[in-house]
Image (cartoon, rainbow, N blue to C red):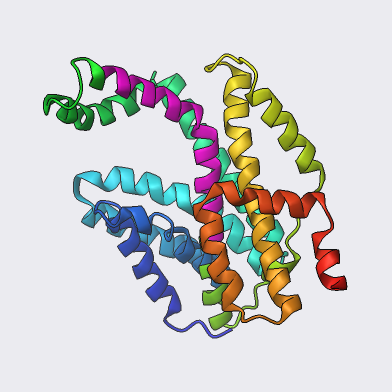
Amino acid sequence: MKIGLKPLGWSLAALALLLSLQTPLSAVTVFLLMTPFVVLFAILRPGEFAAYAAVIGAAVLFLGGGGAPLLLMLMVFYMVPAILMGWLYKRQYPARTVLLAGFGLVLAQLLIELVVFAVVFKLNIADEIAAALLPSLAALEASGAMEAGWAQATAAELGKAMVRMLPMLLIAVSFLLVIVTHGLSRYALRKSGLEVPGLPEAKSWRVPRSLIWYYLAALILSLMPLETGGFWGIAVANLVPILQYIFIIQAIGFFFYLADVKKWSKAVPVIISVPLVLFPQLYLIGLLDAAFPLRRYITKS
């Protein structure tokens, strides 16, 4: 594998992405930041990687200004799962193993951070979210569109609602971060001469049929008068949408399978996947595909 100046280029990319976290571009670059570290660890020896990481950290301290300590913490946060994924790529582990390991580690780090903020710093997450939302809501109230006291009450309710949905949000962010990293890293590493196994073709994506029963149980529980802030209330509130998005993945696999059988253009299932992702109600297609042998009927026809 010819490395050349690639480590220097990926180091500069990592530095640029880290510094971009202080700009409005952070909403996008936050999902790209793991890729340079994954590639660097996969193409370098551990000692060489440590040297490059130290140089990147020093550059962040020099260029990051007052936000440099936070950027260094984020660098470490991203590097830990990136090193794991890079190590697994080096040893040619299946893509599914790499994704599950990376996803689990990112999610674990996020949960640990929440515990640290809540226990060590005595941070009430619901109150912090409410405080962030209050200025915007207060401006709407001040315009006369809402009655007095509406902003305070609404901000508090939204803060509590977002905390209830926090598990689902953390899972979604972890999943998206690892999927984006895998796609970009695999492309970059293949260009560098390192073959990285890909995911199974979309047409073969299937979920265990047992998830149907879990979903039905969660759906029944969601109709019961559970305590909103209690464990079961929070668990059910998050489990239902998570399972629905899993069935959306099944639906995407179904349309790729249908396109393959019918010899449609490869662009057709990609276009169909867009509304599937945007409209969660379409999870019913995946639910039906998991419950009934639709693909067998399509093949026979």
- Closest to the observer, 67 or 248: 248
- Closest to the observer, 53 or 216: 216
The residue drawn where x is 64% and y is 23% is 223
135 to the left or right of 255: left
Above or below: residue 270 compared with residue 293: below
Would residue 194 be counted in the magenta stretch?
Answer: no
> What is the residue that sits farthest to the left in this orientation?
143
Magenta stretch mostly in which secondary structure? helix
Quarter that holds the C terminus: bottom right
Quarter that holds the N terminus: bottom right
Which quadrant of the figure has residue 242?
Answer: top right
Would residue 164 be counted in the magenta stretch?
Answer: yes
Residue 115: x percent and y percent?
49, 26
The residue drawn where x is 42% and y is 81% is 5
- Closest to the observer, 46 or 202: 202
Residue 82 can be seen in this image: no
Which quadrant of the figure has residue 249?
Answer: bottom right
147 to the left or right of 11: left
Above or below: residue 178 compared with residue 109: below
Number of numbered discs on residues: 0
Residue 119: x percent and y percent?
46, 20
Q: Bounds of the magenta span?
A: 152-179
The residue drawn where x is 64% and y is 61% is 252
Above or below: residue 36 compared with residue 121: below
Above or below: residue 249 compared with residue 10: above
> What is the residue that sits farthest to the front in this orientation?
301
Residue 20 can be seen in this image: yes
Residue 54: x percent and y percent?
39, 58
230 to the left or right of 64: right
241 to the left or right of 12: right
Residue 192: x percent and y percent?
54, 81
